[in-house]
Amino acid sequence: MSRDWLEKDFYKILGVSENASLDEIKKNYKKLARENHPDLNPGDPEAEKRFKDISEASAILTDEKKRQEYDQVRAMGPSAFGGQGGFNVDDLGDIFGNLGDIFGFGGAGRRKGQSYQTNLTISFTESASGLETNVPLRKEVTCSDCRGNGSENGTAYHTCNICGGSGQTASNQGFFSFAQPCQACRGQGSVIDKQCKTCKAQGIVIKNETVKVKIPAGVDNGTVIRLRGYGGPGDNGAPDGDLLVQIAVEPHKFFKRNGSDLILEIPLLFTEAALGSTIKIPTLEKTISLKIPPGTPSGKTFKVKGEGISPQGRRSGDLYVKVYLNPPQNLSRSAKKHLEKFRDQFESGDNPRDYLNE
């Protein structure tokens, strides 16, 4: 590390946030590197300086270990440096050699394997309680017969005649001379004398397997669970990629969800709302009693504390019960007369919509 890490904001230099992904960093670096390349800005010392700055920033932020050290140093401030030495531009070796992943040269580096994504549909109740389930996965894995090198066990390699063992071939595009992985040897610099029969020199095979996934309690629709190391194989001993499991939650026939809270709408009989009552209502795990006070209006919401969803490691949500009146249908002649008598006796001259005329 270097003391100038405290002074230089590599994220700002590349125009990305501190939470930017590796792909975002590389994309911005590629754009800025083209704009400020010395070949396109001859005699411009400012452009040359910017090019060195963005190259230094990319060298740090595209290296997982160096990026972590950089973030830690900036968080600690000047106390991070008890002595001299550390990283600077000269320590990059060839600063432009770090353009490998961006401009296509640099040979066959250690690249993390490809990440896979799959979808998993679970019920509303399962999302609330959590579960362990198995997910079928069809993935690329390193060939066990050749251990990923593509050659039949015990056979030799010879230097690639196309790239001369460099693993790269040159391509000229305008002002730039780009290097790209050699297609003949797949960037390895050598060619297999006798190919592995199992993987046909690819070093990988397709395998069907089942992965156990633990779904935490309280998971919501659209949540993505990352299983590290269950993606595609890494290049040249690099870590395998990840498996991203996107959760889809089926709707419930009664309940709706708002964060950790549950919402339940239930009908009331006219007599229950007018006279009051104690009714039975469901929760996700049991049936409870809810007291309805006399004169409860339609649309009133009751809060039942702690009967919502209990996300793992957080407090339980609440259950909100919204009631609405369910007027009687197909009244008999006698019942109709009783209601008319009630209206004439108790509701005469009482119009709840009078405020609309004020």
Image (tube, helix red, strand yellow):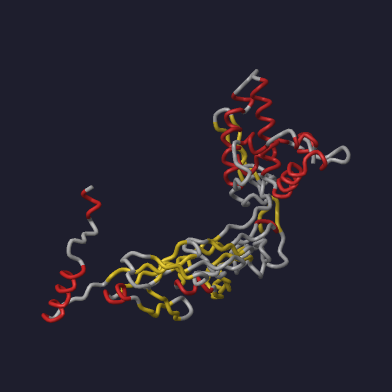
Asked if residue 145 lies left or right of residue 249, the reply is: right
Between 12 and 326, the one lying in front of the other is: 326
Q: In this view, does 260 lie to the left or right of 354?
A: right
Q: In this view, does 263 lie above or below 288?
A: above
Location of residue 211 (image quadrant): bottom right
Which residue sits at x=74%, y=36%? 94
Q: Which residue lies furthest to the right in this view?
A: 83
Asked if 75 appears above or below 202 in the picture, the reply is above
The residue lying furthest to the left in this view is: 333
Q: Can residue 312 be spotted in the picture?
A: yes
Q: How many labels does the image show?
A: 0
Q: Quadrant of residue 237?
A: bottom right
Residue 124 higher or lower than 46, as above or below: below
Could you tell me which residue is drawn at 18 percent across and 70 percent down?
A: 345
Across and down, in percent, residue 263 comes to 42, 67
Residue 2 placement, left or right of 54: right
Tell me where residue 176 appears, x and y as whole percent: 59, 31
Residue 118: percent from left, percent from top:
50, 64
Name the foreground residue: 246 vs 160: 246
Residue 118 seen in the figure: no
Q: Position of residue 175 (x, y in %)?
A: 58, 28
- Residue at the (59%, 33%) spot, across then down: 32
**In the image, farthest residue toward the top:** 43
In front of the other: 225 or 315:
315
Q: Which of 341 and 318 is in front in this view?
A: 341
Which quadrant does the N terminus fall into? Answer: top right
